[in-house]
Image (tube, rainbow, N blue to C red):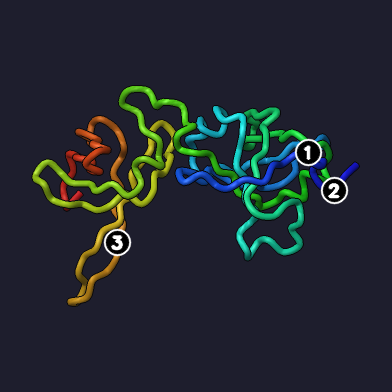
Amino acid sequence: MSSHPTPGAFQASSLPADAIELGRIQEAWGLKGWVHILPHSADTEALFASSQWFLEPPEARFARGFSAFSGSVTATVAEIKVHADGVVARLEGVDSRTAAEGLKGVRIFVPRSAFPAAPEGEYYWVDLIGLDVVNRDGVHLGVVRDLMPTGPHSVLVLEYTHTVDGSPQMAERMIPFVSAYVDTVDQAARRITVDWGLDY
C-alpha cells in the first residue's frame, strides 16, 4: 500500500481566478483511501456537484511533513457522500488509508463558475460575504462577514464600526436570513435590505 497517491492521480494546474475555498481534508476515513472533509459552510452543494476539485497544500502552519504534492493540483472525485459526522469522499488514485492520511490539511477549491445555479430566492454564502446591509430607512447596519447555520435557517453575521469613548471599535450584529426580516438581496448593487432596527 502506498503512502502517496498513485502517480498521475493529481494533475499540476493553476488555481482559477474565481476559485472558492470550500473546505479542507480533516483526516483519513476508513481503510480504502476515503477522506473526511471539513466544509467551511453548511452549504455543501458545490462540493457534491463538482467532479473535479482543485487542491492546495495545507497552510504553512499545518504543512509540516506534508509531501503528497506541491503547488496547485486537480483531483477527480470518485465518490462523495454525507456520513453521520459530515462529508466523506474518495479521490481517484488515493487507494489506501496511509495515502489518505498524507492529505491531512489539504485545502479544497472549486471555481465559482462551476457551482450549480441556486434556486430562485436562494443564495450561496460566498455570494453574500462582503455585501452591505441597510434597513428600510437606509441606515447602514454593517457588512456581511459570515453566514452562520442555526438549524432551520442561517443567520447573517455583520461587522460594523461604532464609537466607544471617542475611538472606533469593531462590533458584530446578527440578523436571521429569513424573508420575515430580509426584503431584498441585490447582488449587482452589493446590498441587502432588511426590516431591522439599530436597537434590535
Look at label 3 and name its amino acid.
Ala
Residue found at x 20% / y 33%: 183
Q: Residue at x 77, y 44 (%)?
A: 100
The first of marks 3 and 1 along the sequence is 1
Q: Which residue is drawn at 66% across and 48% down?
A: 26
Task: Answer with mark 3 or mark 2, whichever residue precedes in sequence.
Answer: 2
Question: Alpha-carbon distance for marks 1 and 2?
Answer: 9 Å
* Residue type for callout 2: Ser
- For label 2, the SS is loop
Residue topped by disc 3: 171
Quadrant for residue 192, please give it: top left
Res. 31 image quadrant: top right
The residue located at (24%, 38%) in the rendering is 188
Residue 116: x and y, percent? 46, 27
Q: Residue furthest right?
A: 1
Quick check: 44 left or right of 144?
A: right
Please identify, in this view, whether the residue under mark 3 or under mark 1 is nearer the observer: 1
Residue denoted by label 1 = 94
Count numbered badges in the picture: 3
Instruction: Give the percent coordinates (x, y) of residue 61.
Output: 63, 65
Q: In the drawing, what numbered circle is on residue 145?
A: none
Relative placement, left or right, of 162 versus 21 is: left
Residue for badge 2: 3
Question: For this rendering, which residue is in front, 157 or 54?
Answer: 54
Q: How crowded is mark 2: few (under 14 residues within 10 Å), some or many (20 or more)?
A: some
Question: Looking at the image, which is closer to me, 193 or 111?
Answer: 111
Quadrant in which the N terminus is drawn? top right
Residue 91 placement (x, y as % from top left): 71, 35
Query: Is the Cβ of the residue at disc 1 closer than 8 Å to that at disc 2?
Result: no
Badge 1: residue crowd in 10 Å (few <14, some 14–19, many ≥20): many
Above or below, 162 relative to 93 = below
Residue 97: x and y in percent read: 82, 42
